Structure formats: structure tokens, C-alpha cells
Amino acid sequence: MIHISLPDGSKKEIARGASLLDVAAAIGPRLARAAVCALVDGELRDLRERLDKDASVTFYTRGSLQALEVLRHTTTHVMAQAVKRLFPTAILGIGPAIENGFYYDFATEQPLTPEDLSSIEKEMRRIVTEDHPIERLDTALEETREILAAKDERLKLELLDDLEEETAVLYTQGEFVDLCRGPHLKRTGEIKENAFKLLSIAGAYWRGDESRPMLQRIYGTAWESKKDLDGHLENLAQIEARDHRKLIKELDLVSFHEEGGAGLAYWHPKGGRMRVIIEDYWRKLHYEGGYEIVFTPHIGRALLWEASGHLDFYREGMYAPMNVDGQDYYIKPMNCPFHIMIYKSRTRSYRDLPLRWAELGTVYRYERSGTLHGLLRVRGFTQDDAHIFCTPEQIEDEISRVLDFSLNLLSGFGFTEFSVELSVRDPKTPEKYAGEDPMWEQAEVSLVRAIEARGLPYKRMEGEAVFYGPKIDIKIKDALGRAWQLTTIQFDFNLPQRFDMTYIGEDGKEHRPYMVHRALLGAIERFYALLVEHYAGAFPVWLAPVQAVVIPISDRFLEYAQGVVDELRKAGIRVEANFSTGRMNAKIRDAQLQKIPYMLVVGGREQETETVSVRLRTEEDLGARPLAEVIAMILEKTEARSLI
């Protein structure tokens, strides 16, 4: 017999070899009917799995996130079965559940097309209606190999070769067989035929390796009900409408050019203007916050990257070296070693500390072409990097200060909902981390106190700290409720030691400074993409690259219109004039599509009264207003950094 510990603290005695479904039945018939999966000692398991030792078990029923994951995993198998029926020569890759959906990879003789998705969906509904029992088979490796070989599933055979266990797990439903760990629903009929949808087809390298074959990846989504599905599809439509890759092109902000190099952004005049606004605001807050701004080179000798450890641990993410005077130089993937060089340029005293140095430093990292994604994932980007060098006695105040600074900066751009992840070392393996135990303990305490003092919700991530120090990651929520990780506040006990950084203490002896890496926006490119999607391109007046456009009713009023433009520019307002031929309504519509906050229309009446007729991008008509009043209104919103 074995003992099962349940969430309420009770225990059940069960025969060794009993299935999780047997355990659920022993607790009660209702649970046996409702249970979808179980968490066994921290791992999500199929109800058909058998237990051979004492375990802690939690059951999940419909409506839980865990059950939804199982539903999606089962739906991806139904999709694979449908593909095999329609395209018998298709070879199975892998098919996991993912956030909000699922995908499956296939090797096919002919590329699948979007038109194929409707046929696959129709066949999936047929499989759901057929209500096949889903069986789990624990089979010996050789027997599994024979089954897969008979079906010519060569990719599955490759996965089988990587298994270290003596047995493999197969799942069957009707004629379909798949190598999979599970868990799955009990029957295909438990999937609601009107609560799933196939979304798209993409290419994916087998096992993420660019040297391996390109497979066809079908993405889909599945939910508990049609209502949930419809809500998700509406959200996807909003996400598509806000996709920064589309908007930066439509609004003439940024472009990419394969002939110039993948993953490298070209900032157009409007995008560049907006970037200057962002960076100027960033600089202003940094100077006010006690930071100094530094500038460092774009390349450095190999010796520098050897000292920092990047050539040992990060070489695959760095570009190939260039030979300069017989020495290898690397384009920088990080700014940190350069800031350390500035620190070491002279002897530092405890009286000099803390030092807070910030840089908008452009770095270059090699990202696989398949991972590039507009401005969110690029190969050249500008980090809003900063490093704080301080004494151990100063660290708690510095962490509190930088946390307040982060929240203030992000809220200025309209982000007000935050969550925090605190990554700390695994207490079971302290030997894997750089730095002494007291340093880690003090760092962790300072991070926790700073978070809790501000009442921020946070999740403790044990074992998630990098080897050189604990860190805080701040996530923001955008207009669609999506969470984005931006700010990182990272201790580093490694680089000060590798570079032998010291300061002279009050006792006249050398001491090791504490070093904190800190990026608030993360990268200008990625942050810009988030701004575009958060505001759907309709930026607040203070951020808008063009704040107003002047539209004359006809060519007779060009001179007056030009005078309006001159007055606006003189006041510091970012203005354009639309003096093109065409109807006034078409010009207004064009300005609305460009999401320009103010449209100032001028004609005979406006010229006589020295006014402008003000229309907003929201289609609201404010009527004729004195030009001075309009200038004051725009400047007031700009100076206040109003979000509306």
C-alpha cells in the first residue's frame, strides 16, 4: 500500500499500482467524474498514470487553468489526427499546449495553405463527434519503436532515441497513435466542437535548429465554451489591429530592410522625432534622480570580453570578431564592462559612492532569424542601461531609490499596473553562485523590503536567479491586459570580482563595491513597440510625433494657413501642413488615419476672425477657436504630459 497526501491535509491509503483515476474514485464518485488531471509531487499527470510510491496529489477539474491546458493538449492531438486523415503522408513532429492555445508541427510533401485550415477544422469536428476513447499505453522502447516505424514516423523515432526511460508512453484515439507524455482528456467527445479554431500556418525548424528541415506549424486555440472562444478571438482581433509591425509602417515610423541586414531597425523622421522625445524625457529624469550620463565605445578588445566572461558564457550571442592591428575586437553585446573601465580609471573612495551612471548604449546580439519579431526582437538595440556602484551600507537605500525611479518613469508613459518577480538563488545549492552568503542575504533582504514597502504584488522565484546575483523584474500591463517584462534591477557579485574593483573605505583599506545593473525601459526599440501597441498608434499629445496638422479649405487660404503653421512652430508645437490638392474631408480623414491629435482647418471665416476650426482625431469638432487659445491648449497638455 502507498499513502496519498491531499491538499486538505488528509491522507488516503491506496494499493500500489493504482491509477490516479482510482485515487479520485476513492475520494468520491463526483471527483472521479469531474477530474481532468492531477498534480503529483509538483508535476501535471494523466489520470491513467499509476502510482508506485507515496505522493502528494492535487486534482483539477473543468474550469481550472490546468484542465484548460489538458483540453488544449488533447485538441492538438485531434488536429494531428485530422491532418493524418487528410494528408496521409504527413509526418508528425511535436504538438504542445501553449498559452491560449496549441500548435503541432508536420513534415508534409506539399506546403499547407490557409485554405487547408477549414478542411482540417471540419475533420476535427468529425473526430470530436466520433467520441473516441483516449487510451494511454506504457510500452517497452523496442515495441514503441516498431509501432512508430510501421507508421513511418521518423521524427517521433528521433525523439524516442533521446528517451532515458525503459518505457515510452503512447496515446491512441481511434486509428491515431502518438508518442506523448500527456496528460489528456478521457475521450475526444469531451472537447466542445464549437469551442476551438485553427488560426494560422507558419514555418518552424525541427527542434528549433536552423540546420534541420523546415516543418509546417499549425497554430490553434481551444476553450471550455464558445463564449470563451469568441472573447479570445475578439481579443486577437484587437491585438492584430494594434500590431506594431503594421502600425509603424502605416504611420511611417520605422522600417526594416532585409538587404541591409535582418533585425536592424531604420528610424524614419517621425519615429526619430518620437524617439528623441522619449530619450530627452529619460535623460531629464535621470539627471533629476542623481544619475550621470556616460558614453562608451561600440567595440572592445577580446581581452575585455574575456575578463568579463562573455567570451566564455555568451560567445554564441556575440558577432564574429574583427581584426584591428592584429587584435580581435568585438562589437559590444553589453555596456557593463565599459562602465567598469570608467570606474577603474582612478582610485575610488567611500566618499565618492554611490556612483550612478546611465547610458543609452546601442548593443548588438546575434538572434536567430526565426526569433526576430519587429521591434520586439532585434539584433541591434539601445539599452537604457545604468550601473550603481555603492558600499554595502548604501545598498538598501539605493534599491529603494531605483525602484521608486522605475515606477515613476513607467507611469509617466501611461503604465500604472505593475507586478514583480523576485528571482533568488536555490538555497539547496549555494555553491553554484558567485559571492559570499552574507552578500546574497543582504541583497535579497534589500530587494524584499523595497518591494513590500511599496505594496507591490510579487512572486518569489526560487532558483531563478542568475549565478551572479538576485534580481527584480517589473512587469507592466498594457491596454489589452497583456503583461510585459520591462525593468530589471540585478545585483552582480561576479564582475566586481572579475575586474578586481575596489574602493578605499573609511578604515583606509580596500573593499569590494556592490554593483547593480539596472535597465528601466529594457531596450528603446522594444519599449517603443509596446508604446505603439498600448496606444494603438494614437499617442498622447506630448509623445505624438506630429501634434497638429493645418488644413486649408482651398488654395486661396494657403498664405493664412502658412502663418498658422509658423506660429505653431514658433511656440514649439510639432506641426505639419497639408497643402496638397484634394477635398478637405479627404485631408481630415488622412490626418485621422495618421492619428494626429489636432486638425486645424482654415478658410474664409477663420482668416477674417484670426481663428482655426479645431477637429480631434476622435472626430470631435471643437469649432472655431482663437489661435492663441489652441496653442495654449496644446502646450498645456504637452507640458503636463497628459495621457488624454
Image (cartoon, rainbow, N blue to C red):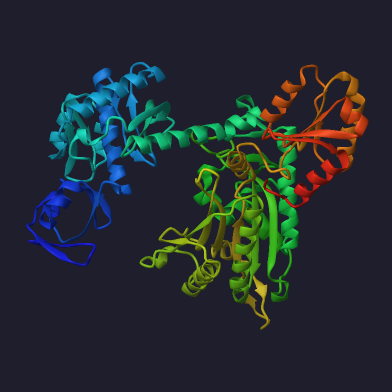
Which residue is more in the foreground, 627 or 193?
627
- Where residue 633 sits in the image (x, y, percent)? 80, 45
Taking the spot 65% from the left edge, 37% from the top edge, the residue there is 538
Total numbered labels placed on residues in the image: 0
Which residue is more in the foreground, 156 or 596?
596
Q: Does residue 235 sit above or below 359 in this rendering?
A: above
Screen quadrant of the N terminus: bottom left
Q: Is residue 581 left or right of residue 38?
A: right
Q: Is residue 336 left or right of residue 419?
A: right
Taking the spot 62% from the left edge, 24% from the top edge, the residue there is 259
Q: Does residue 41 sit above or below 46 in this rendering?
A: below
Identify the image quadrant of residue 591. top right
Q: Is residue 383 left or right of residue 558?
A: left
- Where residue 216 sits in the image (x, y, percent)? 38, 25
Residue 295 in view, yes or no: no
Residue 451 in view, yes or no: yes
Taking the spot 80% from the left edge, 38% from the top edge, the residue there is 574
Q: Does residue 555 sit above or below 27 in this rendering?
A: above
- Where residue 64 sits in the image (x, y, percent)? 30, 49
Which residue is more in the foreground, 489 or 529?
529
Which residue is more in the foreground, 147 or 496?
147
Q: Does residue 644 sit above or below 121 in this rendering?
A: below
Taking the spot 90% from the left edge, 38% from the top edge, the residue there is 567
- Where residue 593 sits in the image (x, y, percent)? 67, 28
